[in-house]
Image (tube, rainbow, N blue to C red):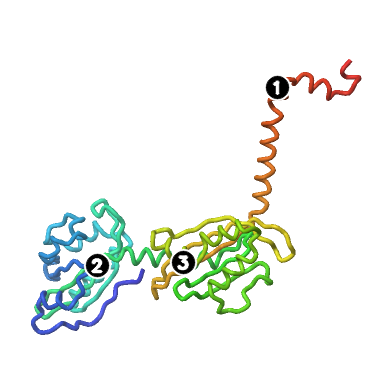
Amino acid sequence: MGSTKISPKNGLGSSGSCSRFFSLTPKARLVFFTYDPKQDLWTFDPSAAENLEFQKFHLPLALPHAHETFKNWAKKEDFPKIVALLDAIKNGKNGETEIWLDSEKCQQVRCEKVVLELQEDGLAYGFIENITTERRIRERYFHEIAYFNERKRDNLLRKAHYDLTTDTLCSFYCRDPGLMPDKKNATFEEVFESLLSMAYTDEDRKTLLEKANRENLIRRYEEGAMQVVLEYRRRTPDGKLLWVSLEIHTYLNPDNGDLECFSYAYDVSNERLNDTVMRQHDELSMTVAPSFSATGAQILLTSLPAEKRA
């Protein structure tokens, strides 16, 4: 997260009124306050008492020791940011910062944006906005970008990054160059059609169509599901059969608001072959075991060489 932003004083007019500042500021999810730098007094606007976000903190409207209050509430690494902001106000400058709150009083980890503007009456007027959701979206998205760029498992067949909103392919890697898309600006639908054409059976195509199509990924994200995992079988260009595990992670791009997905296809043929062998072994054991227990001595006897039976 960035550091505290400090800017020269540029008041909102000679009146320096709290009401004027509040009237010019969007009120969604905001808690308004004034700060007196001489007394280190933080006073919330009376309207804060009706704000559901503010009510979670069980705070009085007046905080006589602002520095100390934030020292108890802010995460240790973020406390210097709020100190820099309050000190800037004392030095006649405006500023804003973002801090993570993480304490028993907060009941949850959350990120707050704090904006302060100094007015001619010597007080600073500002607001606090809960931006936790936005920051979580940003963290998840860029974590996935790093994961996508670094993913190099031996059984990775292909990985792709798509913009579902614009239906475009952002980047693509395939272990078999012959399976690369024909053009760099291919759409999700075009790449998806190539997957369907390689599916082994109608059942495999149905699995892909039901779970991995573009409309389904968008719908599932809207319902809160950010990941799809499925398995299907497909043919290789030389006719071999592969078991494929397909993982699709869906995230919102915090910079442009587009919905994007990252897909990873892994060759799990060896694992499925081992599973089949073990299952057949278990089935055979279940079939043989009762017979062996009933006539075990006879089976053992007849399996010995003649000279050993005598």
Question: Cβ–Cβ below 8 Å for labels 2 and 3?
Answer: no
On screen, residue 186 versus residue 134, left or right, reads right
What amino acid is labelled 1 in the image? Ser
Q: Position of residue 7 (x, y in %)?
A: 25, 80
Looking at the image, residue 129 lies above or below residue 299: below
**Alpha-carbon neighbours of circle 2 within 10 Å: few (<14), some, or many (≥20)?**
some
Upstream in the sequence, badge 2 or badge 3? Answer: 2
Give residue 255's mark: none
* Residue at the farthest right position: 307
Pair 3/1: label in front: 3
Looking at the image, residue 97 lies above or below residue 271: below
Upstream in the sequence, badge 1 or badge 2? Answer: 2
Q: Position of residue 197 (x, y in %)?
A: 63, 66
What amino acid is labelled 3 in the image? Glu
Pair 1/2: label in front: 1
Give residue 293's mark: 1
Q: Which residue is mark 3?
A: 215
Q: Residue at x 64, y 55 (%)?
A: 243
Q: Which residue is mark 2?
A: 129
Image quarter hosting the N terminus: bottom left
Q: For numbered disc 2, what is the local secondary structure?
A: strand
**Front one among 293 and 263:** 293
Real-space CA distance between mark 2 and mark 3, rounded to the nearest whole angstrom: 34 Å
Question: Cβ–Cβ below 8 Å for labels 1 and 2?
Answer: no
Question: Cβ–Cβ below 8 Å for labels 3 and 1?
Answer: no
**Alpha-carbon neighbours of circle 3 within 10 Å: few (<14), some, or many (≥20)?**
few
Upstream in the sequence, badge 3 or badge 1? Answer: 3
